[in-house]
Amino acid sequence: MAVLSESPTLEALSFNKGRERIVKGLTLLLQVIVLMSAVVSANLQTPNDTQRSTPVAVGEVAPEFTLEDQNGHNVALADARGKSPVVLVFYRGYW
């Protein structure tokens, strides 16, 4: 009784190598796209030209700024300046 071995043919091996090349190429392309996205994202976050190198001293007038409140609305210091006292409270938002 003869035993038939199921060895891959030359055509099947060639197909697998071609498929492997395609997968490697697509993986490389995806990595390049992710890297380019990270670079573009980093470049969009340009530093503000009016950033201070030193903190505000006690008694010094606070610089203009706009921040988001707990309800998601933008609040500017200019809106309250001269109308009422302003108290800034900074709290950690990730409990």
Image (cartoon, rainbow, N blue to C red):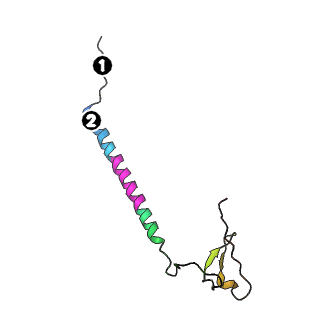
Q: Main secondary structure of the magenta part?
A: helix
In the drawing, does residue 34 fall left or right of residue 90?
A: left
Q: Is residue 85 above or below residue 8?
A: below
| Image x and y of residue 65, in percent | 60, 80
| Image x and y of residue 34, in percent | 42, 58
Q: Callout 1, which amino acid?
A: Leu
Q: Is residue 37 above or below residue 55?
A: above
Q: Secondary structure at mark 1?
A: loop
Q: Is 39 included in the stretch rendered in magenta?
A: no
Q: Report the Cα–Cα distance between label 1 and label 2.
A: 19 Å
**Magenta stretch, residue numbers:** 22-35
Pointer 1: what residue? Answer: 4
For the N terminus, the image quarter is top left
Q: Is residue 13 above or below residue 42?
A: above
Q: Secondary structure at mark 2?
A: helix
Pointer 2: what residue? Answer: 11
